[in-house]
Amino acid sequence: MNDIYMDNNATTQVDPEIVTAILPYFTEQFGNPSSLHSFGNKVGFALKKARKSVQELLGAEHDSEIVFTSCGSESDSTAIMSALKAQPERKEIITTVVEHPAVLTLCDYLATEGYTVHKLTVDGKGRLDLDEYAKLLSDKVAVVSVMWANNETGTIFPVEKMAEMADEAGVLFHTDAVQAVGKIPMNLQDTSIHMLSLSGHKLHAPKGVGVLYLKRGTRFRPLLRGGHQERGRRAGTENTTGIIGLGVACDLAQKYMEYENTLVSKMRDRLQEGILAQVPHSFVTGDVNNRLPNTLNIAFEYIEGEAILLLMNKVGIAASSGSACTSGSLEPSHVMKAMGIPYTAAHGTVRFSLSRYNTMEEVERVIAEVPTIVAQLRKLSPYWGANGPIENPEQAFAPVYA
Ligand code: PLP
């Protein structure tokens, strides 16, 4: 039996069509696009085509708004640092408590450099409070950075509305759309979003390529200075195979968008229903009514997510958990903490993230395996007695996180 991969928010399989499309660019078409000879020209032409494909998927106004980078993290850093460098008089940043570390770690560093970082909080379902946001917008704010969709729960944020509010207040708006691009439709030319990050390896392109979308007219300062590549906005010889692969990935994402929103979400919903029906004391985290079509995050109370993953891995199922095992102590994810998920559940979260490569047969196999694994682990759990959870587990054991 084949292994089942349900960790597509971590990374995706490169589409075989993309592999075929990029192979010649490793061998025959290996030129440097900046060169003036035919070797360079051919690759330059392919990059132009890829830029157009990205523009179309994003619904951008012009292909010059697309800047190729090495990954989502680089795009995030470039956007935020650019806003700060372009407006040195503005010393405040607005972001959220549930961003990816690509944004949060940078913001935490910037806080040590004298910037004021406002982190918007979320409610129990991971939703933002736009009144809290409106109060923070001012001419002191250099940039707002809010993810389009959360990588752990799939919760979608109202970034178009938030960008409009920022624009009205004269504030630059960046969105980390690494998890959203290719999964939900976008038409950036009709929005006030000034900057957007995406990452190739989340939409079936190779690793090592990303994009920063820069709306025309947005003030900009490069992060990487050097050669004139990307119109001087990102120095460094282009990752030609990665970029060409990303172009094809964008064409395919457009083709499969409908599929993603119907069949992939149907598989995800069946998985959710099948597991919840059989596993007591489990629930979905995040906003189930406003979620990426491929993502399902379930909290299995009274057990550890890592233990579930290990046992699932033994039977050939790959998923992920939010907590990170650092220096021997298991910390629940910052996203679960931010939503106020009790620690007895926050430790036991598992994220299943599907793609167009999954099948309903795989979903049924996972539904058949997970309840047995959870029951097996609960037998070993200090929070679980002969007849179910012990009383007041919160008082019986000290919370692990501060
Ligand atoms: N932002 C989000 C929301 C992500 O999920 C990720 C990767 O998981 C990143 C940024 C970082 O992207 P990359 O791995 O391309 O740097």
Image (cartoon, grey):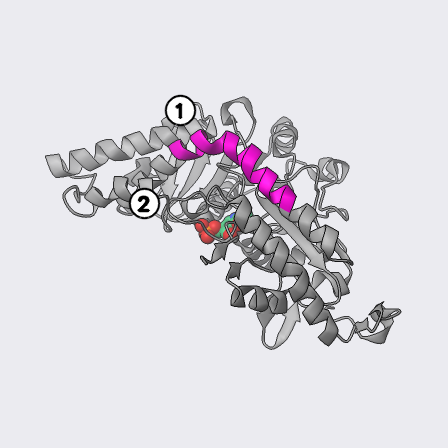
Can you tell which mark lies on residue 390?
Answer: none
Task: Give the camera-side residue of 91 and 180.
Answer: 180
Label 2–label 1 contact, CB within 8 A: no
Q: Which residue is mark 1?
A: 62
Single out the mark in the foreground, 2 or 1: 2
Quadrant showing the C terminus: bottom right
Dominant secondary structure of the residues highlighted in magenta in the image: helix
Q: Residues in magenta?
A: 251-270
Q: Earlier in the sequence, mark 2 or mark 1?
A: 1
Which kind of residue does numbered mark 2 sit on? Gly
Left or right, 112 with reference to 223? right
| Location of residue 71 with respect to 369 vertically, above or below | above
Q: Is residue 253 magenta?
A: yes
Residue 289 in the image: x percent, y percent?
A: 70, 37
For mark 2, what is the residue? 242
The amino acid at mark 1 is His
Q: Is residue 285 above or below residue 65?
A: below
**Residue 10 x/y as whole percent:** 50, 53
Residue at 64 percent of width and 38 percent of height: 157
